[in-house]
Every structure is written in C-alpha cells, then in structure tokens.
Image (cartoon, rainbow, N blue to C red):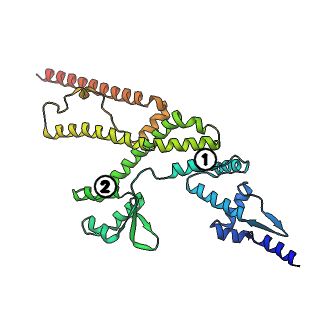
Amino acid sequence: MSGRGTSTATIRSAAEYRIEDLAHASGATVRTIRAYQDRGLLPTPERRGRANVYGDTHLARLRQIADLLDRGYTLASIKELLEAWDAGRGLGGVLGLVAEVHGPWTDEQADRISRDELNRRFGGTQDDQAVAEAVELGVLEPIPGRPDEFLVPSPQELAVAVELHGAGVPLTAISGHLRELRGQVEHIASRFLEFTTEHVFARYLGHRPPTDADAAEAAELVRRLRPLAQQTVDAELARAMRMFATRHLQHHLGADTPLDSGPAAAEPRPVLLPPDTIGAVQQLVGPQNVAAFVAAAAEREVQTRTLDALTTSHVESRRVDQIG
C-alpha cells in the first residue's frame, strides 16, 4: 500500500493540463493550441480516454513560440527552429542570435513623463491631437492603468521636438517631418542590413536554421557591427549638414561667390529621394543601377529644359523681328 502511494505521488508531481488549463496557463487560446498541434509545432499530447493531457513540455513550448512570434518570426521559421531543437542540434546559439538582434540598438534609456510635465514642456497648453500623433508614431507609449503618464522610448527624440516647438515649429509640422525622416532612415537601415548580410552574414545564415556554432559567431558579429550603422550615419549627416547649411546661408544672404570654395565644391552633390521613388526605380532597373538611372534621368531633364528654353528664346526673337 505504501509503495503504491509513493508511486502515485511521483506520477502526480509533474504538472498535467487539460487543453483549457493549458490555454489559461500559457495565455494562448484553445483554438491557437489546436492550430499549433495541426502544424506540428507542439508535441503530441497523451491521450486518456476521450481527452488530451498536456504537460510542462507543452507549456514551455507555447511560451517559446510566443517569444519568437514577438520577435517577428513566422510560424514556418519557428517550426524549422523547433525541429532543429528536437533533432538534438541545439538552439543555444540561435536563441542567442535572436536575443542579440532583438536587443537594444542604442545606449539610450527609456523614461517616463506625466501629462502635466508634457503639457508644461510644450508651452503649457493641452493638445490631445498632438499627443495622439505622438502615440501613433511611438514617441510616446501609453502605460496601462496610468492614463496620465507615458513611457518615452527615446528621451532624446522628445527633447528635439521640445526644442523645435520652442523655436516656433508647429507640432503638426514636427510630426510630419518625423514621418518623412522615418521613411528615409528605414531605407538606410534596410540597405545597411542588405549590405552586411551579403558580405558578412550570408556565410552563417545560408542554411536554415544555422548551426549552433554559426549562430553564436553571427551573434558576436552583430555585437561588433552594431554601432557601425549609427557611426556611419552620424558622419555622413554631419558632412551633409555642413554642405547644405553653407548652401542655404549663401542663398539667403544673396552672396555672389560661393562660401564653399574648396575642392569639395566641385564634387557631386547627394540628393535625397522619397523611399517610394527609390523602390520604384529599383523595380525598374535593379538596385545596382539606381544611381545611374537617376543621374541619367536628371541630365535628360536638364537637357530638355535647356532645349525648350532655346526654342522659346528663338521663337520670341522671330516675333520681335516680325513686329519690327
């Protein structure tokens, strides 16, 4: 009798769940759990009579899937990773790579701000529409249960908006500028990732999923290369701001001679184009021919306008001659 009781206690020490209990413990719905079973993402549950019984393994797997989904992975990719895990290949390096990519890409720390402080920093008036736009853009994030307080993911970005508003820029103009800037920056980030993937990470990520060792080495490279994108953008932005600021000052002062008289004055000038335009040109001629296409299109437009101007001038001259 005592031996049988010990055996029963040992069996019952492991958690067991009906599907409704598993849904409650994991935060997934019953429908989602069944869908994961159908797709082979969950181990087969134990069948007891007419019911399925799940264990801690199923709960851990559901939490694993939820975490990977939050990091932007598709169910198909997650299935490949989990199959590699089940085959004994290990996921330590892969999950380390996931964590490294998903981690913060800046040393800046998020902050909180009250609604009263927010109003004070923007002139002392309450502007619900501006706050709603800031929330939509992610400049502010609502805090559940705290309607009069916001999370500020980037205090620096908010500080820039405060300074611009203090200098007389309307909040609607600041929001519009941020939307435009964000599109251009996302294009730069996308190109940097394409560049590093082609020349650095392709050898590690060529097979799916990557081996544990390759994923671990790729994670180390992410740590090393993480600051390079921002450093490059900072340097190029500083160079471009100096160039364009000089040009704008020259224009507004009405100077007859260029203020920038060094060798760089004869260098090609960069021109920012909307991301949609860049994308359309890439589809038309391919990524490697975008610069040449834009330059040729601009040159053709200049030549066309020059010809139009000459033609117009010639026609006007003939008219003057006939009148005379």
Q: Residues within 10 Å of mark 1 (few under 14, many from 20)?
A: some
Q: In front: 168, or 226?
A: 226
Mark earlier in primary sequence (1, 2)? 1
Q: Amino acid at mark 2?
A: Ile
Quadrant location of residue 215?
top right
Q: Residue at x 83, y 72 (%)?
A: 7
151 versus 324 height, above or below: below
Q: Position of residue 123 (x, y in %)?
A: 24, 66
Q: Amino acid at mark 1?
A: Gly
**SS assignment at label 2:** helix
**SS assignment at label 1:** helix
Q: Which mark is residue 93?
A: 1
Task: Assign the C terminus to one quadrant of the image.
Answer: top left
Q: In front: 118, or 315?
A: 118
Q: Residue at x 39, y 49 (%)?
A: 182
Task: Assign the N terminus to one quadrant of the image.
Answer: bottom right
Q: Is residue 225 left or right of residue 169?
A: right
Q: Which mark is residue 174?
A: 2
Residue pushed farthest bottom?
A: 1
195 versus 180 height, above or below: above
Q: Position of residue 94 (x, y in %)?
A: 61, 47
Q: Is residue 320 left or right of residue 60?
A: left
Q: Is residue 17 left or right of residue 120?
A: right
Q: Residues within 10 Å of mark 2 (few under 14, many from 20)?
A: some
Between the residue at mark 1 and the residue at mark 2, the CA separation in whole angstroms equals 42 Å
Q: In front: 167, or 153?
A: 153
